[in-house]
Image: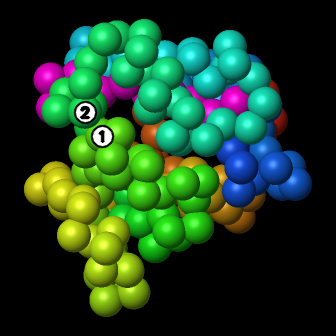
Amino acid sequence: FDKIVFIPAYKAPHKINNNTTTIDHRLSMLKLAIQDNPNFEISDLEIKRGGVSYSLDSIRAYKRQTGLDKDNVYFLIGSDSLKDFDTWHKPEEILQECHVIVALRPGFDPTSIKQNILANVQFANIPRFEVASSIIRQRWREGKTIRYMVTQQVWEYINEHSLYF
């Protein structure tokens, strides 16, 4: 990839009733995490839009904003997200709007994925490692290290703001 654009969800549909970290904290940590990589950018289109953030709406808004077409928009998700992809808001339309690229995570079993979805995604040949926000939060609460899962600046931010206790 020439560039990766991170689009933080204002409110993720599958986390509406959860006690999630505020968007201000999530955005601050994301900025710290990517600040040293010139190939990483942040788009605040979901934050500006507010409300529940559906991937399909964001993909379409990003394409309108940038003038890019399907052939030039790639939507990167983890294989853990692919397991539930068929329950997302209009997953078939997501597959029509862009290329869905799946980063493999440890323990992924493709046999649990519907064939019509598997046939329309590509798997990325990138290093496999487990970095899920839920695991980071859990490890932090349990007093376990999150070294190599977040940057030093993000670790300091979490500590300074007493997040995840």
Find out whether residue 74 is within the magenta segment. Answer: no
Point out the tag, 1 or 2, that comes first from the N-terminus: 2
Label 2 neighbour load within 10 Å: few <14, some 14-19, many 20+: some
Q: CA distance from mark 1 to mark 2?
A: 5 Å
Q: Estimate the x, y position of residue 86 in percent, counting from the top left.
A: 50, 68
The quarter of the picture where the N terminus appears is top left
Residues 70 and 164: in front is 70
- Along the viewing direction, whichever of 153 and 27 lies nearer the viewer: 27
On the image, which quarter does residue 18 sit in? bottom right
Q: In this picture, is 153 found above or below 81?
A: above
Q: Which residues are magenta?
A: 1-10
In the image, is 43 to the left or to the right of 106?
Answer: right
Q: What residue type is disc 1 on?
A: Cys
Residue that badge 2 annotates? 70
Circle 1 residue = 98
Q: Residue at x 71, y 56 (%)?
A: 14
20 on left or right of 107:
right
Residue name at image x 52 percent, y 30 percent:
58
2 part of magenta stretch: yes
Q: Secondary structure at mark 2?
A: helix
